[in-house]
Image (cartoon, grey):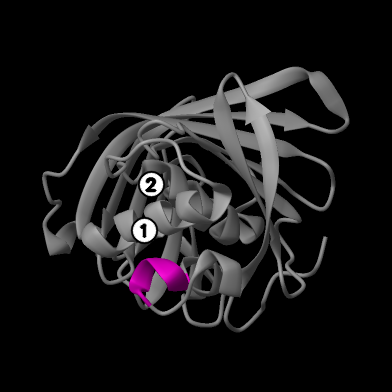
Amino acid sequence: MACSTRTPALLALFILAAFPSGHAAAAEFDDLLAAVEKNYASRTDFSAQFVQTVVRAHLPDRPATKEGRFYFKKPGRMRFDYVKPDPVYYISDGTTFWNYIPDSSLAYKLKVEDSDLFYALKFLYGEGSLRKEFAVSDGGKERERRIVALKPTRPQHNFQQVRLFVDPASFAIVETEVTDPAGNVSRIVFSNVSSDPLPAEGFLFSPPDGVQVEDLNANPPASP
């Protein structure tokens, strides 16, 4: 990922695709949402591989692809380890969110509770719901998958719409698609799902010696 100051909300929304589904037959749209939220309430530890494809509005014919592994642990701990094309890390202990870029010897620091990340993740903590936090609508179907369209109910710097791609037979969310205010579209697909927990210390980060730290709490990112 390129711009560290715009990524927390997007990463939070990618988590939606990572949670395994419950077992049920195809249902009406409201039942679909209820089944998805039930999954969040029942999962405490989770990891998966991911592939992210970003289509930039000004370069639609040159998509960028990135790969890595994602980890989540309630309450509010998460970690994205990008391994291709370059190593980049996004780590949250539930209180502080870090973005560490080894090749640049640079780390960004942000309070979770003051960020779009906390807002987008509230329902994962059991403090909110999709309908409460987003304007939710039925996005139709694509490749036999039901689409749940989400728009934020308050202004966001980082995204203007999210689409969740749901397998209607299993209620698995197999992909997410995020559109930012500039019209860039990021789609992420998860695979190799595992419930093996990452130790709590895996969600802690301390900047190595020589790494420059930029505190975004003192200098919050500007609107795009």
Residue 59 relative to residue 193: left or right? right
| Residue beneath the point at 77% across and 39% down | 184
Give the spatial CA distance, label 1 vs label 2: 7 Å
Front residue of 194/85: it is: 194
Percent of width and height locating residue 140: 69, 35
Q: Amino acid at mark 1?
A: Ile
- Compared to residue 156, the image places residue 172 above or below, namely above
Instruction: Of the two numbered discs 1 and 2 on the same chain, state the one appearing first in sequence.
Output: 2
Image quarter of residue 194 = top left
Percent of width and height locating residue 170: 35, 34
Q: Secondary structure at mark 1?
A: strand
Rendered image: mark on residue 91: 1
What stretch of residues is rendered in magenta? 122-126
Percent of width and height locating residue 21: 31, 42
Rendered image: mark on residue 21: none
Quarter placement of the N terminus: top right
Specify whether residue 208 is in view: no
Percent of width and height locating residue 68: 38, 32
Q: Amino acid at mark 2?
A: Phe
How many other residues sit within 10 Å of disc 2, few (<14), some (14-19) or many (≥20)? many
Residue 83 relative to residue 221: left or right? left
Rendered image: mark on residue 80: 2
Q: Is 125 covered by the magenta stretch? A: yes
- Compared to residue 155, the image places residue 178 above or below, namely above
| Residue beneath the point at 56% across and 22% down | 144
- Compared to residue 103, the image places residue 3 above or below, namely below
- Compared to residue 21, the image places residue 214 above or below, namely below
